[in-house]
Structures are given as structure tokens and as C-alpha cells.
Image: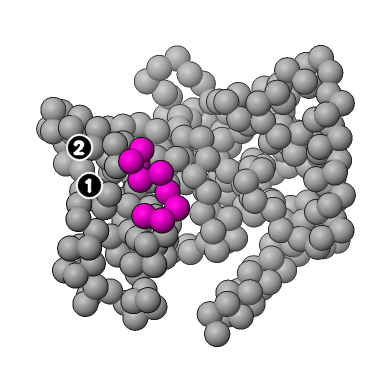
Amino acid sequence: DVADATARLIAERYEAVATSLPGPRRPIVASSERLCGWGGARLCSDEDEARYPEAPTDSKYLNAGGYLGPAEELSEMITAVLEMKSTATGVHKEKGQMSDQYFFKLYFWDNLDKIVLDYNQSIFGNFLEIVQRPCESDWVPQCAVKPCCTESDNFRRFHELFYGLYDVKGCAVWRQDKLPVSWHGNGAGKWLYLLALDRLSMRCPVVANLTLALSPTDMIGGVFRRFEERSRIEGLKWPGGFLITDPVRMHEDQAKDLPAECAS
């Protein structure tokens, strides 16, 4: 049964991450990302960055998009975060006004014995990508490598970036040799999320049907039409465009080539 196999995989990966650091087992596994900041492109200060523990990968920073653990510990964490947010004053209120991630970050720093980040993104994949070079603008983000700049929001690069790092196999999105349980397209990662959704929709009828049923298709289709128009003007090639093709015809043409697990 696929559901049982998925549940076993999540449990195995959770246990591996929860026991990955020296010392006692951490009951909560939280998602991580490569950019130190929180909602609205707010960046960590040098002091914020210094409060993060050393990490085995460049995905060093807490992301509030995913967390996993026993219900009691999760309830305690979420209750504390909501309490911090509702009672915040001064600089904390200003910094956390548009994002709960700021307060999750504070809770993480004060509870390193309870939370471990998914540094290898084995459970929570994150589409936000960085490169180790200065930004072309005067923006100076905080990353584990320096200098750095976000790359997944670079119009002229994110197609090359996506097809260089990611591969859609059947109904799954891989990043190089890694297949997370879930994917999160936060901040500058939203563009790669859209490309992944597009590729999945072209390859997997299950995702195609969900995209058509649940997504704001007019908006996403409009985004891809603007991409194609801009790429035509600039002489770039933009493969894809599920929502600006005929999905029914696409399914008839491609269904015979799809893996068995995606055929229903």
C-alpha cells in the first residue's frame, strides 16, 4: 500500500534526523533553508546569523514551512510561538509583523535541545537556491557561504538552474540524487516551484488533474505566457507551459509513455 509505505518512509527519515546530532534525541524536526531571514525579504543581522549552530550543509537556517514531531511537543512549540507573536512589542513586534517565521526562529534558538533542522532536506525540500557570488544589485543576503546571492529568482537563470539541479521522474521531483518527502516554494523559491509544478503536470496526470482542479490556473497560465513572451523578446528558450497547452491532448499524446504509478 502506497500510503503505508510513505508513512514508513517519513517515520524512518524523521528518526534519522531526530537522532542526527550529538546528545539526546530532538523530538521536533523543522525544515531548513539556505537564506537567513524571514517573511518579506527580511534578512538576519550578523548577530542573528551567529546564533545559529554550525551545520553540515549550506541549508543552515530555520524555515517555518514544515515541522514534524509528537503532537504534545508541536502543540507546546506552536502555542509558545503564537503567544510570543500576540504579546510582542517594540522591535520584536516590528520584525515579526508580517511573518511567524521570526518567532519560530526565536523559539528554535531558545530550544536547541528540542528541535533539529532537516539540514539535508530529506523530509522538507526547499526550492530557494543561492550561488556563491555577490548579487548584481546592492543586496547582501545572509547565507552560510559568502559572498552569496539568491539565484532562484533570477529570470535569466532560473530555467537553467532548475534543469541543472532538478529532475522530474514520473510523479516525483528530485534535486540531484535527493528525493524529499515534500517540497516548499518559499520566497525566491516560488519560481522554481512553478517550474516543478509545470513539469509534473506534463509528466503525471494525477498532478495535472490536481493543478487544474485546485490551482489558480488563469494566474499561473498568465505567468507562463509572460515568461514565453519575454523569452521570445530576449532570445531565450523556455521549455514547458502545461497550462498554455491543451491538457487533454497532452494526456492523449503522453499518457502511453508515463510510468505506471502515474497512470491513475
Relative side of 54 to 196, left or right: right
Task: Identify which residue, 94 or 159, lies in the foreground.
Answer: 94
- Name the residue that disc number 2 marks: 228
Magenta stretch, main secondary structure, is: helix
Q: Quadrant of the N terminus?
A: bottom right
Could you tell me residue 188's position as x and y percent?
Answer: 46, 35
Element assignment for label 2: helix
- Name the residue that disc number 1 marks: 244
Residue type indicated by callout 2? Glu
Task: Identify which residue, 54 or 121, lies in the foreground.
Answer: 121
What residue is rendered at 13% in x and 28% in y? 233
What residue is rendered at 73% in x and 17% in y? 94
**Label 2, label 1: how far apart the Cα atoms are:** 10 Å
Could you tell me residue 58's position as x and y percent?
Answer: 56, 44
Quadrant of the image occupied by residue 230: top left
Relative side of 193 to 34, left or right: left
* Label 2 environment density (alpha carbons within 10 Å; few <14, some 14–19, many ≥20): some
Residue type indicated by callout 1? Ile
Quadrant of the image occupied by residue 100: top right
Magenta segment? 212-220
Q: Mark 2 and mark 1 in contact? Answer it, CB < 8 Å.
A: yes
103 versus 112 height, above or below: above
